[in-house]
Image (spheres, coloured by chain):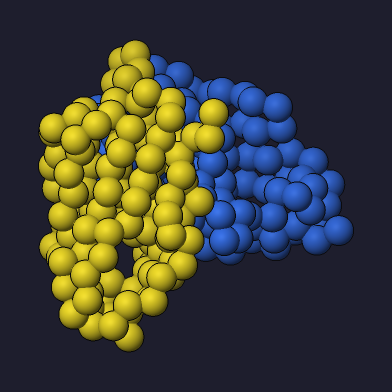
């Protein structure tokens, strides 16, 4: 079963605009992670936010976590064509990760030059 | 460091054939996992390992076997390939992190087609 569900499934924007992707999950977690996947490539870890954190920044990325609503959002500011990729949220499977993550279906982001 | 490597990159099998997908990491990570990715399905966990000699099943283990004889290697065996196993397979590793939080490092994937 899918723990995380991303919304929207696809997002198309112009360069310079902001992109926001949302993730909802079902069970209690101790962290939530976001990954990026360029076409035909493996996933790359972007950012991890712990359950006691509400917001985290990394460069042009901003992640929020609302444990009461069981949701997270990923904001990419001033997007670039190189940000075109699929973005996945992932949550630990069974409390702590121990190398096990449950992924959502992903959001396909297209940034037009 | 090479990170996580996977071989082969592409493979075509006939139904009933067996094969092994190779995965290796040179980061001395304790945890390793195998996922499959199908269109519209995200990634689903097949098997994982928390250390040499220790493996366990994930969400979709049927038709696959794993073993972990060394920290570095985590091969995935398809026992008798079926068309339903056509997918892209990713191996990942992660270090032991604090507070149960583990960032995963992914290999480039193996694209498998079963005819």
Let me know if residue B27 appears in the view: yes
In this view, A104 is above or below B97: below
State the residue in front, B92 or A87.
Answer: B92
Residue occupying the point 42% across, 55% down: B7
Split into 4 quadrants, where in the image is the N terminus of chain A? bottom left
Position of A17 relative to A60 (above/below): below
Q: Colour of chain A?
A: blue
Q: Quadrant of residue B48?
A: top left
Q: Where's residue B82, x and y in %? A: 22, 78
Which quadrant would the C terminus of chain A be assigned to in this image?
A: bottom right
Q: Does B65 appear above or below B26?
A: below
Task: Residue B21: give x, y in percent of width and height.
Answer: 32, 57
What's the residue at 45%, 39% (across, down)?
A: B4
Residue A71 position by quadrant: top left
* Residue displayed at 43% across by 26% down: B27
Vertical arrangement, residue B81 with respect to residue B31, above or below:
below
**The chain shown in yellow is which?**
B
Q: Is residue B91 left or right of residue A37?
A: left
Q: Position of residue A93 (x, y in %)?
A: 24, 39
Q: Is residue B47 left or right of residue B4?
A: left
Q: Residue furthest bottom?
A: B115
Question: Please, which residue is most extreme toward the top here?
Answer: B98
In the figure, is residue A113 to the left or right of B79? right
Identified at 26% across, 77% down, the residue is B84
Please tell me which residue lies in front, B103 or A4: B103
Note whether residue A72 is visible: no
Q: Nearer the viewer, residue A100 or A56?
A: A100
Count of number-bearing discs: 0
């Amino acid at each position: 079963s899918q723990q995380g569900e991303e919304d929207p499934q696809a997002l198309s924007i112009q360069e310079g605009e902001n992109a926001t992707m949302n993730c909802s999950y079902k069970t209690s977690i101790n962290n939530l992670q976001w990954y990026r996947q360029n076409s035909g490539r493996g996933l790359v870890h972007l950012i991890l936010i712990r359950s006691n954190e509400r917001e985290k920044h990394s460069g042009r990325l901003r992640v929020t976590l609302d444990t009461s609503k069981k949701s997270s959002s990923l904001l990419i500011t001033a997007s670039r064509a190189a940000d075109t990729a699929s973005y996945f949220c992932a949550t630990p499977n069974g409390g702590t990760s121990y190398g096990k993550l449950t992924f959502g279906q992903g959001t396909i982001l297209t940034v037009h030059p | 460091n090479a990170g996580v490597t996977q071989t082969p990159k592409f493979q075509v099998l006939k139904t009933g054939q067996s094969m092994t997908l190779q995965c290796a990491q040179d980061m001395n990570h304790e945890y390793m996992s195998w996922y499959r990715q199908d269109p519209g399905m995200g990634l689903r966990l097949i098997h994982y390992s928390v250390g040499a000699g220790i493996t366990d099943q994930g969400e979709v283990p049927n038709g696959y076997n794993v073993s972990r004889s060394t920290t570095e290697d985590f091969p995935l065996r398809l026992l008798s390939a079926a068309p339903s196993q056509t997918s892209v397979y990713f191996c990942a590793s992660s270090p032991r992190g604090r507070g149960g939080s583990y960032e995963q490092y992914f290999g480039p994937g193996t694209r498998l087609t079963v005819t």
